Image (spheres, coloured by chain):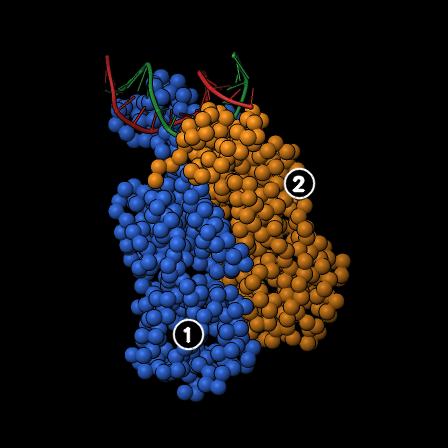
Chain colours: A orange, B blue, C green, D red
Amino acid sequence: MKRPTIADVARRAGVSKGAVSYALNGQPGVSAATRARILAIATEIGFSPSSAARALSAATAGAVGLALCRPARTLGVEPFFMALISGVEAELSARSYALTLQVVADHDAEIAVYRRWWGERRVDGVLVCDLRTDDRRIAALQQLQLPAVVIGGPGGTGELASLWSDDAVALTEAVEYLVALGHRRIARVGGLPDLRHTEIRTDAFAAVCQRLGLTEAVTVFSDYTGEEGGRVTRRLLSSAARPTAVIYDNDVMAVAGLSVAQEMGLTVPDDLSIVAWDDSPLCRLVHPPLTALGRDIPAYGAHAARHLLAVIGGQPATRVQDESPQLTPRGSTAPPRDK
Amino acid sequence: MKRPTIADVARRAGVSKGAVSYALNGQPGVSAATRARILAIATEIGFSPSSAARALSAATAGAVGLALCRPARTLGVEPFFMALISGVEAELSARSYALTLQVVADHDAEIAVYRRWWGERRVDGVLVCDLRTDDRRIAALQQLQLPAVVIGGPGGTGELASLWSDDAVALTEAVEYLVALGHRRIARVGGLPDLRHTEIRTDAFAAVCQRLGLTEAVTVFSDYTGEEGGRVTRRLLSSAARPTAVIYDNDVMAVAGLSVAQEMGLTVPDDLSIVAWDDSPLCRLVHPPLTALGRDIPAYGAHAARHLLAVIGGQPATRVQDESPQLTPRGSTAPPRDK
DNA sequence: CTGAAAGCGCTTACAG
DNA sequence: CTGAAAGCGCTTACAG
């Protein structure tokens, strides 16, 4: 099949190519009748403007980039990214933007990808994930003046636009809930310590534990994988004064932690209460289903995409707050059997 | 920052734009010395050719499309897709191709996306997932003459190129293994029945069970979600002559099935053996870890991408076989306690 | 081996 | 309200 061009539409409509362009893009310059006729013909012959030609003349790529900087083995397991992507994508495709995805090994590679995308004019802007403390990507992006929205914060995002949600409040709520149930020895299995949101959660955990006088509270760091999450849990549960409740920084580690507890003969929730972050179907897959902190991740992604499109459109690069995570109590939390 | 163009490189090198193009694309037409000088300058000023300009003049998009036709809620949980994407992406980016991703609601929407991509010249080819029996996408793609590789089969892929793996052999092997352990009442929780690979597995299951005289073997269909997988398992385990082994068509349903068994007071593997497809970290997250049929999914994705690039490059649209899934025995399978 | 030029398919001022 | 034309930044025959 021969792809129709704007010239084909113009010929059949008996107008100039310019008129077709105006009609298709909703610009003034054609009468309503002509516009209707042109649109009908375009639909009839199945015309879609060449993204390349449009990009070249309009200096806009019609695409948004997302670089995922996680090892392949971690990428697949966490439902978080797919959920985020599906939300991002829904918003973008509704506005006729394409999503360009690239998996990168580290921040150097990621920055190189941003430079290339910028030089190639391949994307109009990017979404940045997994914000770290002292994140070099921020300065690189600012230097390129490539429109960007950082998913994370608050803080550490420089002059870039960002979308954040209040993890500190959510974590505090979870700890207060566990304390209300009667727990005193609460442990937290954190994610990678140099991620900004890990830092925020760690600080919030320390603060609420101090306020409530939980002197035995402890955070140990892990890497989001089931292997590490299980290993760390095994160590925690082997200690003399083992915790009666553990809060995990993601769903995968929480599920692994549950397995370890059961393998060690502990009953969840009687002997051990478990709280997961990133509420996902994974949390409902296991028995007992896990109490979890979560929110609507596809909506978060859609929100981020909307914000990015606004920045690309010239809106100021603001910091926007998304909804806070909510605690959903399920079968994995209860008053401790032996206090 | 101003983006450098080919003219900037040409000016600094004191040559024509054509010479720069030849040098950058490894074409003959420039001396080795000139080529080296041009490349050095391009690197120095950070020049990347505009993807739009290149696409427009070379009539090649430099991108490959992947439309994912699954409801958002299912998408996130199965590690399969992210693993596949990471493999696809690794291969593509090594060849400087971009991956354009779109989530669609159904096949009509997916076909519409293919038409649009084709009309917009946005992608040079597409990867097709979740092949169904009588799949309308095949004819649509053939009509558009859009290069494509179908991930699935064998069979049902029309004239399109495809990459398939022998699920029948793998399933047969799994059943023989369970029978060797002493199982006679084996059930299978299948995926969506109109998917081609479900059909293949169902036929293979029926064939091996008949050959081995397993008259009580049964396949029940599900939808890959944990909810449904759990529900179906509950029904199977409540029947008078409950199965002593269950084979699940994906990892998520297998994990859900394990939970249900444990919730019903059954011990895995003594009372019930479980085999999962799509071996993934999920299978090692639970206790006992699940015996699984699996293979290297990122490698599968990379293979598919390589095949597509070959087809885009003009190679004939062949059917290529990937490695067969392997059975990895873990703690969820054992001889049945009561035969 | 190199340069000048046409052309890819759009968008967008600029005349009429 | 409409048409003719320039231009986006490349690639690629075509001369030299």
In the rendered image, the vertical position of residue B138 relative to residue A119, given as above or below: below
- Co-location on one chain, circles 1 and 2: no
Quarter occupied by residue B175? bottom left
- In the displayed structure image, the side of residue A7 where residue A290 appears, left or right: right
Report the residue at 32% width, 67% height from top.
Answer: B168
| Of A138 and B5, the residue lying toward us | B5
Q: Residue at x 68, y 76 (%)?
A: A337
On the image, numbered disc 1 is attached to which residue? B219
**Mark 2, residues whose alpha carbon is within 10 Å: few (<14), some, or many (≥20)?**
many
Between tags 1 and 2, which lies in front? Answer: 1
The chain identifier of the residue carrying mark 1 reads B
Q: Residue at x 58, y 38 (%)?
A: A309
| Disc 1 packing (10 Å; few <14; some 14–19; many ≥20) | some
Task: Please state the horizontal and vertical placement of residue B323, each as a whole percent of the image.
Answer: 31, 60
Determine the chain carrying the residue at label 2.
Answer: A
Q: Amino acid at mark 2?
A: Arg
Q: Is residue A166 above or below residue A315?
A: below
- Residue B261, visible in the rendered structure: no
- Locate the C terminus of chain B by quadrant: bottom left
Instruction: Tell which of A264 and B158 is nearer to you.
Output: B158
Tag 1: amino acid: Thr
* Location of mark 2 (residue): A319
Disc 1 secondary structure class: strand
| Figure disc tally | 2
B251 and B100: which is toward the camera: B100
Q: Residue at x 73, y 62 (%)?
A: A176
**What whole-number distance in Å separates the C-alpha atoms at marks 1 and 2?**
53 Å
Quadrant for residue A9, please give it: top left
